[in-house]
Amino acid sequence: MDESHVEGDLVETLFTEQQIQSRLAELAARIEEDYAGRDILHVGVLRGAVMVMADLARHFGRHVEMDWMAISSYGSGTKSSGVVRILKDLDTDISGRDVLVVEDIIDTGLTLSWLVSNLTSRGPASVEICTLLRKPEALQMSVEVRYVGFDIPNQFVVGYGLDYDERYRNLRSIGTLAPHVYS
Ligand code: PRP
């Protein structure tokens, strides 16, 4: 894969395409086992989760139903405030459904904590979370996450859905950004 359009922007690759895909395959196998005989509704949180949703789903050997939410944190710039508004709600009635929220990253945990309580209020059979990345050191709100791809240090990462200023989402790998990109 030619990633030369951003060559030099990444300092370090944390996870290669192969590492991400093999971890997603493991998670999909676990999820299939855990939900044997039950239909899951996968809920992706736009926009960063698009890649994880697509690739996780393609590791399943069963039908995968997907729906999407777009939410936005009120408050300052890039920091989560925990106060969230819904920009696009689910099209699906989730009452009585087994819901699996699929995320690219849990940082402070504020977004997911709000989302889980919002979804729970709609009367689903269950709500669980699958996230590719989690930053344990950045957590401000404890969130119970059943499926975690990788725990990472508290550093800014891009690629595979994660952006800096709406760029780098299309990278197949995940890495840290060189300081010169910020300046
Ligand atoms: C990211 C990620 C989560 C949220 C996690 O989305 O997809 O939704 O931040 O952060 P938190 O744990 O600190 O609440 P972001 O707001 O960057 O939007 P995007 O998916 O459109 O890039």
Image: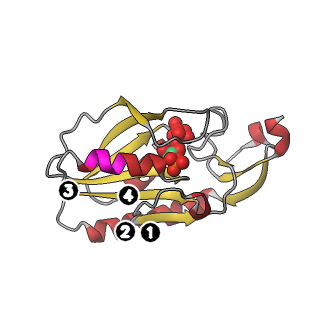
- Closer to the chain start, of discs 4 and 2, is 2
Q: Pick whichever, 140 or 90, lies toward us.
A: 140
Can the viewer see residue 18 in this picture? yes
Q: Residue at x 69, y 60 (%)?
A: 14
Q: Residues within 10 Å of mark 3 (few under 14, many from 20)?
A: some
- Closer to the chain start, of discs 4 and 1, is 1
Q: Which amino acid type is shown beneath numbered disc 3?
A: Asp
- What secondary structure is found at the residue carrying circle 4? strand
Q: Does residue 117 belong to the magenta stretch?
A: yes
Rendered image: mark on residue 34: none
Q: CA distance from mark 3 to mark 4?
A: 15 Å
Q: Which amino acid type is shown beneath numbered disc 4?
A: Ile
Side of 154 relative to 179 (left or right): left
Rendered image: mark on residue 39: 3
Above or below for 88 versus 27: above
Furthest-top residue in this view: 87
Q: Residue at x 69, y 55 (%)?
A: 155
Rendered image: mark on residue 26: 1
- What secondary structure is found at the residue carrying circle 2? helix
User: Residue 180's spot in the image, x, y percent?
Assistant: 85, 40
Above or below for 35 versus 9: below
Q: CA distance from mark 4 to mark 2?
A: 15 Å
Magenta span: 115-119
Q: Are marks 2 and 1 in contact (CB under 8 Å)?
A: yes
Q: CA distance from mark 1 to mark 3?
A: 19 Å
* Dominant secondary-structure state across the stretch colored magenta: helix
- Closer to the chain start, of discs 3 and 4, is 3
Q: Pick whichever, 42 or 26, lies toward us.
A: 42
Q: Does residue 181 belong to the magenta stretch?
A: no
- What secondary structure is found at the residue carrying circle 3? loop
Q: CA distance from mark 4 to mark 1?
A: 15 Å
- Closer to the chain start, of discs 1 and 3, is 1
